């Protein structure tokens, strides 16, 4: 759908989706200047940071609070709204929580047709309702570059939070969506497949996972698989070993990577998360560093639960791929 003076939504943006994230390395440096809030009931804040903040209300309830927004990565405004909402809602699922309430965060050119904005909001509302929550308002400002996202509040039991810092040696590592959204979008690949995955909420995967009590969980977004594995490794004080050939790719993502296509997030992610990867093909490294939007859950849980977890996902026709393991040591090894 055309926007201002016939321009497409992506034509109004310098870079969309989670590839627009600020450099992870620079962000870490920036946050070093903040003193973590000392509050007994702040269960997850900046020390260490995670996918969302968590604040305990009482012995049985804690609130999960997250915020996520970005410029458009597709031209269809309804799809843009659905993708942006999915990406924000998935942070709550990555903490083990359930969304309750969402508020829109929006910035659009004033000249953009009203029906374009209405389609973005409608797409987001559809996803929020599908997640079992309500879109209850928000705030919109004028801006030359469109941006949209959500602030989301959810709930979780204080003893059932999924941190990214709990991976243990002996764990198996799983991923609940294939990789390659950035490559597919940049290389003009199968857009329909990419949109299908980017609008797939992690709710069902989280529901199946919850009884297995995973040691660590995060969702794979703008820092790529290797970037988020690096965060899990560093904060858990373990080595993560990833089998490059086991990394799942969207249909034409690897072929696009072989053509040399890369997104703006690729060099930033390589700077943030260097990995040991001797002999690994360039296209597989590109897939691991590719900035994902609304990606799957990266799960670390005891290896003896692996077969049961895989069986439960198969029974519900949900995607799941074992991609590696957790060891004593440090860093991320790709082999």
Image (cartoon, rainbow, N blue to C red):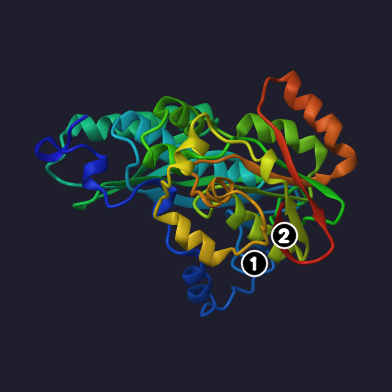
Q: Residue at x 56, y 78 (%)?
A: 35
On the rendered image, what quadrant is the N terminus found in?
Answer: top left
Q: Earlier in the sequence, mark 2 or mark 1?
A: 1
Residue 124 in sight: no
Q: Secondary structure at mark 1?
A: loop
Disc assigned to residue 48:
1
Q: Please tell me which residue lies in front, 131 or 222.
A: 222
Q: Is residue 243 above or below residue 114?
A: below
Q: Residues within 10 Å of mark 1 (few under 14, many from 20)?
A: few
Q: In the rendered image of this protein, does residue 27 appear above or below residue 127?
A: below
- Relative to 95, is 258 on the left or the right? left
Separation of residues labelled 2 and 1 (CA atoms): 8 Å
> Picture coordinates of residue 177 (x, y %)?
60, 35
Check whether the beta carbons of the residues at disc 2 and disc 1 lie within 8 A of each other: yes
Q: Which mark is residue 36?
A: none
Q: Nearer the viewer, residue 89 or 76?
A: 76
Helix, strand or loop status at disc 2: loop
Q: Residue at x 42, y 25 (%)?
A: 192
Q: Position of residue 13 (x, y in %)?
A: 26, 48
Residue linked to disc 2: 165
Q: Residue at image x 45%, y 50%?
A: 68
Q: Going by the image, does 142 lie left or right of 195?
A: left
x and y percentages locating residue 92 in the rendered image: 58, 45
x%, y% of residue 116? Answer: 23, 32
Q: Residues within 10 Å of mark 2 (few under 14, many from 20)?
A: many
Q: Nearer the viewer, residue 276 or 84?
A: 276
Q: Is residue 115 left or right of residue 50?
A: left
Q: Residue furthest front?
A: 279
Looking at this view, name the residue that lies furthest to the right: 304
């Amino acid at each position: 759908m055309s926007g201002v003076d016939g321009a497409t939504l992506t034509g109004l943006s310098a870079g969309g989706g989670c590839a627009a994230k600020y450099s992870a390395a620079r962000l870490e440096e920036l946050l070093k200047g903040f003193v973590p809030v000392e509050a007994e009931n702040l269960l997850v804040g900046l020390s260490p940071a995670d996918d969302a903040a968590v604040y305990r209300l009482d012995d049985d309830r804690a609130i999960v609070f997250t915020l996520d927004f970005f410029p458009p990565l597709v031209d269809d405004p309804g799809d843009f709204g659905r993708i942006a909402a999915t990406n924000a809602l998935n942070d709550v699922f990555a903490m083990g929580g359930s969304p309750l309430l969402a508020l829109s965060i929006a910035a659009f050119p004033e000249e953009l047709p009203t029906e374009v904005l209405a389609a973005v909001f409608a797409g987001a509302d559809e996803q929020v309702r599908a997640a079992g929550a309500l879109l209850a308002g928000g705030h919109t400002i004028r801006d030359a570059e469109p941006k949209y996202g959500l602030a989301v509040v959810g709930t979780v039991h204080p003893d059932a939070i999924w941190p990214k810092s709990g991976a243990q040696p002996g764990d198996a590592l799983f991923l609940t969506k294939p990789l390659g959204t950035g490559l597919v979008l940049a290389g003009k690949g199968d857009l329909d497949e990419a949109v299908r995955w980017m609008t797939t909420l992690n709710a069902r995967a989280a529901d199946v996972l919850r009884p297995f009590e995973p040691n660590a969980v995060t969702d794979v977004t703008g820092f790529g698989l290797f970037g988020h594995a690096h965060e899990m490794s560093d904060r858990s004080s373990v080595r993560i070993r990833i089998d490059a050939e086991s990394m799942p790719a969207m249909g034409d993502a690897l072929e696009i990577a072989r053509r040399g296509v890369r997104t703006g997030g690729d060099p930033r992610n390589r700077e943030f998360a260097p990995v040991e990867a001797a002999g690994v093909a360039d296209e597989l490294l590109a897939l691991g560093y590719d900035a994902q939007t609304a990606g799957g859950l990266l799960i670390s849980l005891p290896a003896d639960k692996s077969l049961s977890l895989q069986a439960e996902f198969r029974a519900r026709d949900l995607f799941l791929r074992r991609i590696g393991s957790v060891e004593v040591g440090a860093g991320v090894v790709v082999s």
